[in-house]
Amino acid sequence: MPSSSKRVLIDTDTAGDDAQALLLAATTDRLGIEGVTICAGNVEFDRQVENAKYALELVDNETTVYEGARSPLLKDHEFADQIHGEGGLGGDLFPETGIDSGEEYAVDYIVETVRENPGEITLVCLAPLTNIALALKKEPALNDLVDEVYVMGGAVHWPGNDTATAEFNFWVDPDAAKLVLEHLDVTLFDWGLSVRDTAFESDFFSTLRTEDDTALADFYLESTKVGRAYNEEHRGGERTVQPDSSVVAALIEPDLVTETDHAYVTVDEREGITRGHTVVDTGEWELGAPRTTLVESLDSDLFERMMRSLLLDGTPDDAL
Ligand code: RIB
Ligand code: CA
């Protein structure tokens, strides 16, 4: 890894978009992946573990995958295989890599890694926040030990994707999300941002189909197949959004972020129709000191170029 690379630890519930995020991180010279940790989320836990290993192996990356929380802190949860397909990668891909997981429990690995490298590690949180909340319980000084904390989750002044009021990651473990947002300085990429600035439509898919076939383009098309069909049926067109990969893209190229705000953010952890709802106060309500950086817009053309470059040339860096 080049010495100037930003060191990231990626926590993921590996389905399609998480896999694209891992591919971005594994193929850029600008990031070095310390480790990948798996948290209960999109699909059955062991599938998520295999999916992460498979994505990394696709690009010859040997980062160790550590297994973490298999359920949310307190709540029951449902998978999202209606979006991602049964195994999480479109429904037809069920990788068995034969690669061993790291021996340590993911939460212990996170805590140990940030303690050994104070101020050096950026946590990239692409899953329900259970592992991160458990790490925070184990190491209350977590905020001082990390470099940054980037989170995909929540729906800021926007309808959810999992319920009318909540985004999936926050809905699955609202207790963890609340804890993390109230105790860590988070840079938040919410579902509304994903919809506004990371959507790909048929012209993007056509390019992938007509350019010289690449393994990564094929993988992208396969792993987004069920989601594209779902969106065509329920959301007015064959499209994908890339919530998780846009977080990693912004770490690779900070200029991707074109607008931010600061706010106090917390999460409704109660059962009921507002479970997982993102509560945002930019000052008017005096709910608390603003400690969350809200990412409000991205350069969507640059993001699309980075993803195209990843899928067709094997690295996002050619687009930079
Ligand atoms: O709700 C968005 C989340 O769902 C992201 O973490 C993405 O991976 C998708 O699974
Ligand atoms: Ca995810």
Image (tube, grey):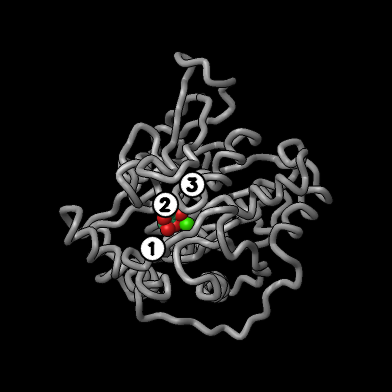
Query: Which residue lies under the disc numbered 1?
Result: 80
- Say whether mark 3 is within 8 Å of ligand 1: yes
| Secondary structure found at label 1 | loop
Q: CA gap, disc 2 to disc 1?
A: 8 Å
Q: Residues within 10 Å of mark 3 (few under 14, many from 20)?
A: many
Residue 300 appears in view:
no
Q: Evaluate if marks 2 and 1 touch, with contact meaning CB atoms under 8 Å apart.
A: yes
Q: Nearer the viewer, residue 156 or 56?
A: 156
Residue 43 position within the rendered picture, expressed as x and y whole percent measured from the top left:
45, 68
Give the mark nearer the N terminus: 2 vs 1.
1
Q: Evaluate if marks 3 and 2 touch, with contact meaning CB atoms under 8 Å apart.
A: no
| Secondary structure found at label 2 | helix
In this view, the residue farthest toward the front is 271
Query: Which residue lies under the disc numbered 2?
Result: 168
Quadrant location of the N terminus in the rendered image: bottom right
The residue located at (62%, 53%) in the rendering is 31
